[in-house]
Image: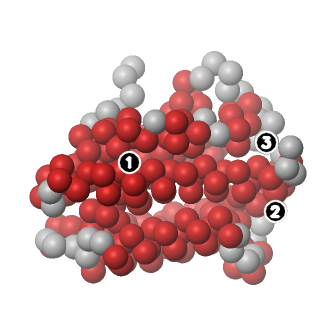
Amino acid sequence: MPNPLPLDFGLFGRLRRDAGADWDRYVNHRFVRALGAGTLPRPAFQHYLKQDYLFLIQFARAYALAGYKSATLAELRAAASSVSAIVDVEMPLHVGYCAEWGLSEADMQAEPEALETIAYTRFVLERGLAGDRLDLEAALIPCIAGYAEIAAGLRADPATRTGDNPYAAWIEAYAGPDYVAVAANAIEAMDRMGQARGAAARYPDLLATFRAATRLEAAFWEMGWLAGTGPC
């Protein structure tokens, strides 16, 4: 069955292709490969989960900013829906999932933000503050689409452990139809936004933002990896 995620579609597809090795280092990071193999050390995943909780708070703020930067009511509604989805749906699910790994919400709230978390999330917010909605989308889309691509790739990889893999639920959550639909909609919405906001003339700046966000995603994986394995 063909992957329903439109990875080669429109503006995102061009950005993804032109990001080249940066994108590959993100979606095929050793943290990702270890998730698929089921060999990622538990402390690495727990550290990632705690930082991801803090990351989601800042991403909700970024979508609130997207609402302010919206030019149409449809864009405003989409941004408001994203804020609600993160705060009212994704974060409670994340808290419930983390409880299975011995992490309470109080634990995550007390966790200081890692430098990598600060660098990534504040970069996204800065691009939204300094630019328009399209600049912000170029910083947001690597996370949204990248996680769907990563999970779909792991699900399709014969080397991925199934059944007894402790990370199987994580993989299925991001490879499932609900999340794939979210990612596909974001890709298509970005293309429409690009057409309305002159993406062709602005492409070098958009690519610079996209590549920086992609590198910051890879650094986020590396942060988790080093927390559980040490620098080796």
Residue 102: mark in rendering? 2
Where the C terminus falls, by quadrant?
Answer: top right
Instruction: Give the mark, 2 or 3, whose residue is nearer the N terminus.
Output: 3
Q: Nearer the viewer, residue 128 or 175?
A: 128
Measure the alpha-carbon separation of dots 1 and 2.
Answer: 29 Å
Q: Which residue is found at the position 18% from the left and 49% from the top?
A: 200
Question: Which residue does the numbered mark 3 point to in the structure image?
Answer: 40
Packing grade of label 2 (10 A; few <14, some 14-19, many >=20) is few
Where the N terminus falls, by quadrant?
Answer: top left
Residue 60, given in percent of the width and then of the height, sits at 45, 73
Packing grade of label 1 (10 A; few <14, some 14-19, many >=20) is many
Residue type, mark 3 in image: Leu
Frontmost of labels 2 and 3 is: 3
Q: Which residue is found at the position 52% from the left and 42% from the top?
A: 22
Residue 211: mark in rendering? none
Q: Nearer the viewer, residue 137 or 164?
A: 137
Residue 99, given in percent of the width and then of the height, sits at 74, 63
Helix, strand, or loop for circle 1?
helix
Q: Is residue 223 visible?
A: yes
Residue type, mark 1 in image: Ala
Q: Is residue 222 above or below residue 34?
A: below
Q: Which residue is found at the position 32% from the left and 55% from the top?
A: 206
- Cβ atoms under marks 2 and 3 closer than 8 Å: no
Residue 183: mark in rendering? 1
Instruction: Give the mark, 1 or 2, whose residue is nearer the N terminus.
Output: 2
Packing grade of label 3 (10 A; few <14, some 14-19, many >=20) is many
- Cβ atoms under marks 1 and 2 closer than 8 Å: no
Frontmost of labels 1 and 2 is: 1
Picture quadrant of residue 164: top right
